[in-house]
Amino acid sequence: MATPKQKFNYVYVLLSDKDNKFYVGSTSDLRKRIIEHAKGRVDSTKNRRPLSLVFYEAYLNKYDSLRREDYFKSSKGKIYLRNMLKEFMVINKRNNSESILIPQIGRISEITGNGGYVLKATGAQPEHPNGIHLTPTRPL
């Protein structure tokens, strides 16, 4: 169990609306990293925006998160991700809508008054434990 001083390390998966491909990354500050992607400050995704955060995992150990990132980037890991997110991909493709998302999955959709980003997610609680603000949108 994490103590208040421990930081989580995250592995995250973004989906490009432009090319419908995944981007896998890792970070110790998920909120900051997602904002960097959204603002085009990450070379590998700046031309693939807009992006959706479709999945993330939290780890107490940086090396565990790096191993998981490497796995998701492998051939088997790519297949695993596609299978795990298959229902999301079908819903997203069928409706071709930015507002139809499943719980715990968000889309950077707008800038708030204080310069932060709002991630929309269906059925999510207004405030997510990792500090990312989620705004409920229309149900599936």
Image (spheres, helix red, strand yellow):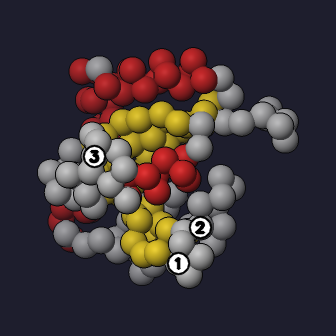
Q: Residue furthest left?
A: 19
**Disc 1 + disc 2, Cβ < 8 Å:** yes
In the picture, measured across the screen, residue 91 lies left or right of residue 41, that is left
Element at label 2: loop
Which of 45/131 is in front? 45
Q: Nearer the observer, disc 1 or disc 2?
A: 1
Element at label 1: loop
Determine crowd level at label 2: few under 14, some 14-19, many 20+ residues with C-alpha closer than 10 A: many
Give how far apart the Cα atoms at labels 3 and 1 are.
22 Å
Q: Which residue is mark 1?
A: 112
Q: Which mark is residue 45?
A: 3
Give how far apart the Cα atoms at labels 3 and 2 are.
22 Å
Q: Position of residue 9 (x, y in %)?
A: 60, 33
* Dot 3 amino acid type: Thr
Position of residue 109 relative to residue 105, above or below, is: below
| Pointer 3 or 1: first along the chain | 3
Q: Is residue 54 visible?
A: yes
Q: Which residue is mark 2?
A: 133
Q: Residue at x 48, y 18 (%)?
A: 67
Q: Residue at x 15, y 51 (%)?
A: 19
Q: Position of residue 128 (x, y in %)?
A: 64, 61
Which quadrant of the figure contains the N terminus? Answer: top right
* Dot 1 amino acid type: Thr
Q: Which mark is residue 62?
A: none
Q: Position of residue 38 (x, y in %)?
A: 38, 58
Element at label 3: loop
* Dot 2 amino acid type: His
